[in-house]
Image (cartoon, helix red, strand yellow):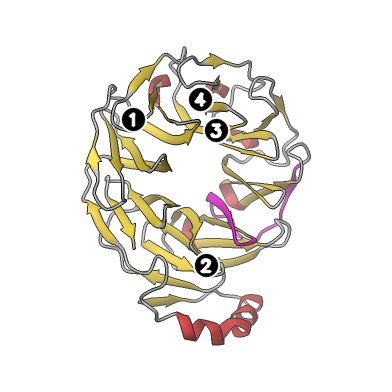
Amino acid sequence: MKTLRPYGARLLVALLLTLAAYNASASSGSEAGATWTLRVPGFNDLSSVTYGNGLFVAVGGSHSSSTIYTSLDGLNWTEQPSPTREWLRSVTYGNGLFVVVGNDGTILTSRDGLSWMQRSSGTSNNLFGVTYGSGIFVAVGWNGTILTSRDGVRWTEQPSPTRRGLLGATYGNGLFVVVGYSGVILTSPDGVNWTQRVSPTEEGLRGVAYGNGTFVAVGDKGTILTSWDGVRWTHRALRTSKNLKSATYGDGFFLVVGGGGTVLASRDGVNWMQLTLGDGDLHSVTYGNGTFVAVGANGIITSPDGVRWTERASPTRDSLYGVAYENGIFVAVSYFGAILTSP
C-alpha cells in the first residue's frame, strides 16, 4: 500500500496537523475502499453506474454496441439484453424507474433493471447526461438538447437558449443546473423554462455538483466556478491548468479531480487546497462510509478527509472511468468494461 503525499507548504502544514491520526489509520486493511475485487473482467466501455430499488445498474458500450450490467449485491453481476446497439452514456434512478441515455438520442427505461424498453426521444443528437429532481427527469446532450419527462415514457424537447453541447446536469435547492462546452450554464426551476446565465469562462464545463447550499462546476484548464443561487457565478483562481473532470460533496467537503493526478478540496467552494497525486488522470470521485474514493488511469486512491490519500491495489490495469457508493459498497467501472467492488 503506497501513501501519496501532497506538495506545497500549506498542504504540509495540514498533514502535520493530522499526522498522528493518519499513522494510526493508514495501514488498516479494514478501511472503507481499502481492498478491491474484480467482479467482471469486461469488454465494452462502462462509463456510468447508479443504484436504486435494491439494484446496481452499470451502462456503457462502444460505437457499435451497448452494455448493461445489473447486480443485487454488488458482487454478482449479470449482463442484460439491450434493445439498442447505441453507446450508453449515463444512467440515473428516480420515481421507481431507471433511465439510461446515449448516442443518437437513445433513451432506455426499466423498472426492474432486467427488462429494458427503448423510448422515443424525438432527437438524433447524442445524449450525455441525465438527472432526476422534483418529479422530473432531465436529459441533456449535443447541440443544446434538453429533454424532459415525468414518467420516463413520454419525452418532450424543451426550447434551449444554446446550441452548445451540454455535458453535465444536477438538481439542488429547487433548481436544475446544466453545464457544457464554451462555459455554458443553464438553469431551470421546472425543467421546462431554461435561462442561460452569464458565465465567467469560455472553457468547457464537464461536471457540476451541489452541496451545503453551493453549486460547483468544473471544467477544462483548471476551471472551477461556484454559485450560491445558480444565477451568479464566480471563477475561482487555481494554480493548475489541468482539465477537471468530476466533483462531489461529502462530509462537509467539495472534492474535485482531474488530469495529472490533480485533487482539489474545499469546505466553502471559495478557498481550495490543491494536491498532485502521481501523474495519471483521475476521472471520477465519490464519497461514502466516511471515505472519498477517486479512480482514474493509474487505479484507485482513497482518503478519509480529502487531504491524506492512499493508493490502493487495483485488480485490473484498465483505466477506471466511474465510481459510486450505495448500499455499503463502492463500485468502480472501467474503460474496457471491468467492474470492481469494495469491500
In terms of image quadrants, where is residue 227?
top right
Residue 243, percent across and down?
A: 53, 50
| Residue type, numbered disc 1 | Trp
Q: CA distance from mark 4 to mark 3?
A: 19 Å
- Identify the mark at residue 40; answer none if there is no mark: none
Q: How many marks?
A: 4
The extreme right residue here reads 232
Image quadrant holding the C terminus, namely bottom left
Dot 4 amino acid type: Trp
**Labelled pair 2, 1 in contact (Cβ < 8 Å):** no
Q: Which residue is mark 3?
A: 132
| Distance of label 2 from label 4 (alpha carbons) | 32 Å
The disc labelled 2 sits on which kind of residue? Thr
Residue at 29% over, 26% down? 115
Q: Report the residue marked by disc 2.
A: 276
Q: Nearer the viewer, mark 3 or mark 2?
A: 3
Specify whether residue 236 is painted magenta: yes
Disc number lying in front (3 or 1): 3
Q: Which residues are magenta?
A: 233-252
Q: Which residue is mark 4?
A: 142
Name which residue lies at 36% across and 61% down.
Answer: 298
Image depth: mark 4 or mark 3 in front: 3
Mark positioned earlier in the residue sequence (4 or 3)? 3
Provide residue 194's location: percent of width, then percent of height.
69, 23
Separation of marks 1 and 4 at Cα, in angstroms: 14 Å
State how far apart marks 3 and 2 are (Cα).
33 Å
Circle nearer the N terminus (2, 4): 4
Q: Disc 3 vs disc 2: Cβ atoms closer than 8 Å?
A: no
Label 3 to label 1, Cα distance in Å?
21 Å
Mark 4 closeness class: few <14, some 14–19, many ≥20 residues within 10 Å = many
Residue shown at 44% from the left, 68% from the top? 278
